[in-house]
Image: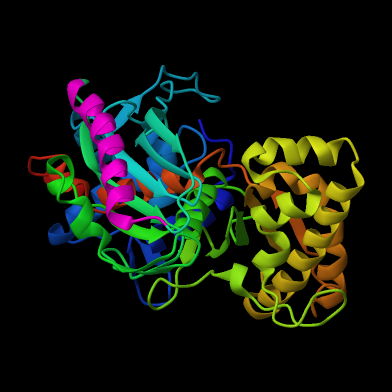
């Protein structure tokens, strides 16, 4: 059962209904659709409430949050239960007289989506079900700088084939696939315009991936790595107060994404968030023309600490935790660079929280203070709205999780094909 107050539920529900495309009535108040031709909209509305709730909800909770009658909610929930999109937990004793409430949750191991990723130092595939569980995962390490797109995507398709075969053999339905890429990606289908650290330019990724029979019927939706990682982070923080933040993904390159009320702002083409290419200029100790990646990218951190790149992030974390001077000085400088660059972004977009993901998640204790010093100095609104810097909550490989979530959100927006059969008239 949800422990949110009615006001909190209504507030979070309004944000979710905006993302689900709910209708507005005169006066700006949002209501559930009431016309018979929009019954399917209400099915989506109910499924979204169950999917997005941070804790199990009851039919009564859904009714309060959506404005639908309890009878309508029950009819819609029954359809979602039959379709295997929603599951019931054991009843919970009611606080007042009446029947025990039956908590509702997204159905586990029924429908899954597959998120894939090409990064500079790994390829990955992850299958996630409606309940958020990781069903299967494949990670392959490598150095893909200056790589051939065709051979890399062939290898990724092979990894995906193994995951998709496992899903099929277990009887799970597959909602679709998504692919995270570290660069400029045209919305949804591509092409990948530019991935500087891979050395790729104008690559028709979907065409290359769908040459493989296993993906021919499941062509991937494409998006920037940081945008999909931010989607996973927004999902992990759903229902919390901090649903607007600037997400920073630290890898070999540095990506970013703006999250407003739980939704990603991707820009007109889907190209937003390339903060690693912000030019820092000659302020302080930063060279004219130096980009943020030059000071705070993973390669720069390893080189500055005097640690061979092949030893990986774990060696850098150990050196910093041990107080080795080269490592601590490099991370302090990186934190200053991050604070300086991100102050410019915060001054434009007006968010109060910066979330550090990717490699920065493990280095946050060494980066936070120098970042905050720059932010407090350079963000105009800092005296009235303190900026916070927090660690990401979405776990390892969030871009793959975010890709799967993005696909599952399409199911939530239009679940009728997955819940076949006409709706009862009471579900208007």
Q: Considering depth in this image, is 299 or 126 the residue closer to the camera?
A: 299
Q: Residue at x 28, y 38 (%)?
A: 160
> What x and y, as percent, mark residue 119?
46, 51
What secondary structure is the stretch in magenta mostly built from? Answer: helix
> What x and y, as percent, mark residue 225?
46, 56
Q: Is residue 285 above or below residue 42?
A: below
Start and end of the magenta stretch?
147-169
Task: Indicate whether residue 8 is drawn in magenta.
Answer: no
Q: Residue at x 46, y 32 (%)?
A: 56
Residue 67: in sight, yes or no? no
Q: Residue at x 53, y 56 (%)?
A: 11
Q: Is residue 60 left or right of residue 418?
A: right
Q: Considering depth in this image, is 349 or 48 the residue closer to the camera?
A: 349
Task: Indicate whether residue 161 is drawn in magenta.
Answer: yes
> What x and y, as percent, mark residue 53?
47, 41
Q: Is residue 70 left or right of residue 334?
A: left
């Amino acid at each position: 059962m949800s422990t949110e107050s009615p006001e909190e539920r209504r507030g979070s529900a309004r944000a979710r209904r905006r993302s689900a495309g709910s209708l507005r009535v005169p006066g700006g108040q949002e209501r559930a659709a009431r016309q018979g031709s929009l019954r399917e909209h209400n099915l989506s509305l109910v499924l979204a409430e169950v999917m997005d709730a941070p804790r199990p909800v009851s039919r009564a909770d859904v009714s309060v949050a959506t404005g639908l009658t309890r009878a309508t909610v029950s009819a819609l929930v029954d359809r979602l239960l039959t379709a295997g999109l929603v599951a019931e937990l054991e009843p919970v004793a009611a606080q007042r007289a009446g029947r025990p409430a039956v908590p509702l949750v997204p159905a586990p191991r029924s429908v899954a989506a597959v998120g894939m990723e090409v990064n500079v130092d790994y390829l990955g595939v992850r299958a996630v079900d409606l309940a958020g569980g990781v069903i299967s995962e494949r990670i392959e390490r490598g150095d893909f700088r200056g790589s051939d797109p065709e051979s890399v995507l062939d290898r990724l398709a092979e990894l995906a084939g193994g995951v998709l075969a496992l899903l099929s053999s277990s009887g799970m339905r597959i909602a679709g696939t998504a692919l995270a890429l570290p660069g400029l990606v045209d919305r949804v289908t591509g092409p990948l315009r530019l991935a500087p650290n891979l050395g790729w330019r104008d690559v028709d990724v979907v065409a290359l991936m769908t040459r493989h029979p296993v993906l021919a019927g499941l062509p991937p939706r494409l998006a920037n790595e940081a945008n999909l990682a931010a989607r996973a982070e927004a999902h992990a923080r759903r229902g919390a107060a901090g649903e607007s933040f600037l997400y920073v993904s630290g890898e070999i390159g540095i990506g970013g994404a703006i999250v407003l009320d739980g939704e990603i702002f991707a820009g007109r083409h889907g190209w937003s968030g390339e903060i690693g290419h912000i030019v820092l200029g000659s302020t302080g100790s930063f060279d004219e023309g130096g980009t943020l990646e030059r000071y705070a990218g993973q390669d720069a951190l390893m080189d500055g600490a005097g640690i061979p790149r092949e030893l990986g992030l774990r060696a850098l974390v150990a050196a910093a935790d041990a107080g080795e001077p080269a490592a601590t000085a490099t991370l302090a400088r990186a934190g200053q660079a991050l604070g300086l660059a991100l102050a410019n972004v915060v001054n434009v977009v007006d968010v109060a929280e910066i979330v550090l993901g990717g490699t920065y998640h493990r280095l946050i204790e060494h980066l936070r203070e120098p970042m905050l010093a720059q932010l407090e100095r350079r963000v105009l609104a800092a005296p009235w709205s303190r900026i916070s810097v927090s660690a990401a909550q979405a776990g390892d490989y969030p871009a793959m999780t975010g890709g799967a979530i993005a696909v599952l959100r399409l199911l939530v927006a239009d679940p009728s094909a997955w819940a076949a059969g006409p709706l009862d008239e009471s579900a208007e």
